[in-house]
Image (cartoon, grey):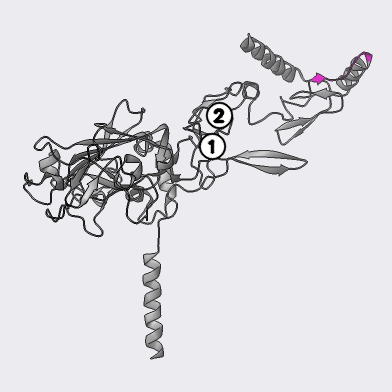
């Protein structure tokens, strides 16, 4: 009896573990842009690739509908249940708060009772198509980190297209097609994401998995599977993130696939639940969406770990001497080398690729001083090739600038130069650097 109880408990434990197993954070952390490290007698900055934490991006969007008068309630209208044409007790009235279904109810908190949702007008103009475009705009480039999930309060549409824009809605490209019959609706063979391979993971497919008409308990959602595509490179449980990060670093098309500024949901045909439309009861056919989930983060090119929403607009809080809404250019005076996005590799901290000053670029940004050509002058001592520790009365990158006054300045300079004569090669290099800087300033 005791052994039986042990086996039962063990089986329950394994089942619970499988049930509660989740994907790890699909894009890693990279939440620190820089940290201080101690080098002998001073603290120095160590820079790393960084990005904002993933969050619910629906908090920062604006929504628009086309046609603009497609929301129900003006004038008030009665609706019937799709599965029961004689159950016609659902009223929509835009002037009554309890009966109104405006677009913002697609983004409010879930779990309310009764459920809140946006609802379209009914298919009263049949056979003219009942079509709606729902456009979500962020006015900012964002990166998707999890599945896009649409939850319908009505039957799921029989035809739907999900589209994205990378240029703030000027041009659009399809993300995925959805239909109860892909061949009939879009002349495309039906396919599921699990049928894709690493070489075809960016293929635009039509799926029939989310287009059943009737509302069953677990059949209200329509998904665009982001994590399943990640898994094609990172493995079934996303444990091999190095593979995904390596591809994201080197393949622009892959990065762009998960990047957007706008998302458009094109509802093309509502659920009918049958092959024929009941023209005697068109109030059965409409669209109703109770929730839209878009999980992602601001695109900051791995140069920021924070994104702020200020005055109705998202913007990266750029680090690494970068600037711009996406940290996509170097700050003024930090253009010593061409801007470059950060790199996820090597894991786990990546490479910052910070912008550097022009002066440091001239004298080698990774080596400020040495004991050969870039010697510290006037008695200065080079520390870790990163800085000169100057004697009293001198300053500058190589301790080349006298900071004394009056006659004592000449005495100090002559005494120091006699003790530490400046090599000819170093003098030439320093003069060339100074002349280059002056020419650039002109």
Q: Quadrant for the N terminus, please.
A: bottom left
Q: Quadrant for the C terminus, please.
A: top right
The answer to the question of whether label 1 and label 2 lie on touching residues, with beta carbons closer than 8 A, is: yes
What residue is disc 1 on? Answer: 304
Q: What span is colored magenta in the figure?
A: 401-407
Report x, y in % for residue 266: 24, 37
Q: Is residue 208 left or right of residue 375?
A: left
Q: Is residue 254 left or right of residue 156?
A: right
Q: Is residue 392 left or right of residue 207?
A: right
| Residue with the most extreme top position | 442
For the question of whether residue 347 can be seen, the reply is: yes
| Residue with the most extreme front position | 96
In the image, is residue 65 above or below residue 214? Answer: above
The secondary element bearing badge 1 is classed as loop
Give whichever of 411, 14 is nearer the camera. Answer: 14
What residue is disc 2 on? Answer: 322
The secondary element bearing badge 2 is classed as strand
Give whichever of 36, 40 is nearer the camera. Answer: 36
Q: CA distance from mark 1 to mark 2?
A: 9 Å
Q: Is residue 76 left or right of residue 254?
A: left
Q: Residue at x 38, y 72 (%)?
A: 14
Q: Residue 405: say if magenta.
A: yes
Crowding at mark 1 (Cα within 10 Å: few <14, some 14-19, many 20+): many
Quarter where residue 355 is shown: top right
In the image, is residue 358 above or below residue 307? Answer: above
Report x, y in % for residue 164: 31, 35
Q: Residue at x 25, y 33 (%)?
A: 69
Q: Residue at x 88, y 22 (%)?
A: 416
């Amino acid at each position: 009896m005791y052994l039986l109880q042990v086996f039962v408990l063990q089986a329950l434990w394994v089942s619970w573990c499988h049930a509660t197993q989740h994907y790890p954070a699909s894009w890693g952390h990279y939440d620190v842009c820089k940290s201080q490290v101690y080098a002998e007698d001073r603290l120095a900055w160590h820079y790393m690739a960084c990005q904002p934490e993933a969050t619910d991006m629906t908090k920062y969007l604006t929504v628009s509908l086309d046609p603009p008068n497609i929301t129900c309630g003006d004038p008030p209208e009665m609706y019937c249940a799709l599965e029961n044409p004689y159950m016609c007790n659902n009223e929509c009235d835009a002037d009554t708060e309890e009966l109104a279904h405006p677009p913002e109810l697609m983004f409010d908190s879930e779990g309310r009772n009764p459920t809140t949702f946006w609802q379209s007008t009914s298919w009263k103009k049949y056979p003219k198509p009942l079509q709606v475009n729902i456009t979500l705009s962020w006015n900012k480039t964002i990166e998707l980190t999890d599945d896009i999930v649409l939850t319908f309060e009505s039957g799921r549409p029989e035809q739907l297209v999900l589209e994205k824009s990378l240029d703030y809605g000027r041009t659009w490209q399809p993300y995925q097609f959805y239909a109860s019959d892909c061949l009939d609706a879009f002349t495309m063979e039906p396919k599921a994401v699990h049928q894709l391979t690493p070489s075809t993971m960016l293929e635009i497919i039509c799926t029939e998995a989310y287009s059943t008409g009737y509302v069953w308990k677990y059949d209200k959602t329509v998904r665009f599977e982001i994590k399943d595509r990640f898994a094609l490179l990172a493995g079934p449980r996303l444990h091999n993130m190095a593979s995904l990060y390596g591809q994201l670093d080197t393949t622009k098309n892959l990065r762009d696939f998960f990047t957007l500024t706008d998302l458009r949901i094109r509802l093309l045909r509502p659920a009918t639940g049958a092959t024929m439309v009941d023209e005697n009861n068109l109030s059965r056919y409409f669209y109703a969406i109770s929730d839209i989930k878009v999980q992602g983060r601001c695109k900051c090119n791995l140069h920021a770990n924070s994104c702020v929403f200020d005055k109705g607009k998202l913007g990266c809080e750029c680090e690494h001497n970068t600037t711009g809404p996406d940290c996509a250019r170097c700050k003024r005076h930090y253009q010593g080398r061409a801007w470059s996005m950060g790199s996820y590799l090597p894991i786990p901290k990546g490479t910052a690729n910070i912008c550097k000053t022009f002066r440091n670029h001239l004298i080698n940004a990774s080596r400020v001083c040495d004991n050969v050509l870039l010697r510290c002058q006037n008695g200065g001592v080079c520390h870790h090739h990163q800085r000169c520790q100057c004697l009293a009365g001198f300053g500058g990158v190589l301790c080349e600038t006298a900071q004394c006054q009056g006659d004592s300045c000449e005495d100090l300079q002559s005494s120091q130069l006699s003790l530490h004569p400046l090599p000819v090669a170093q003098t030439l290099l320093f003069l060339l650097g100074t002349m280059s800087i002056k020419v650039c300033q002109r």
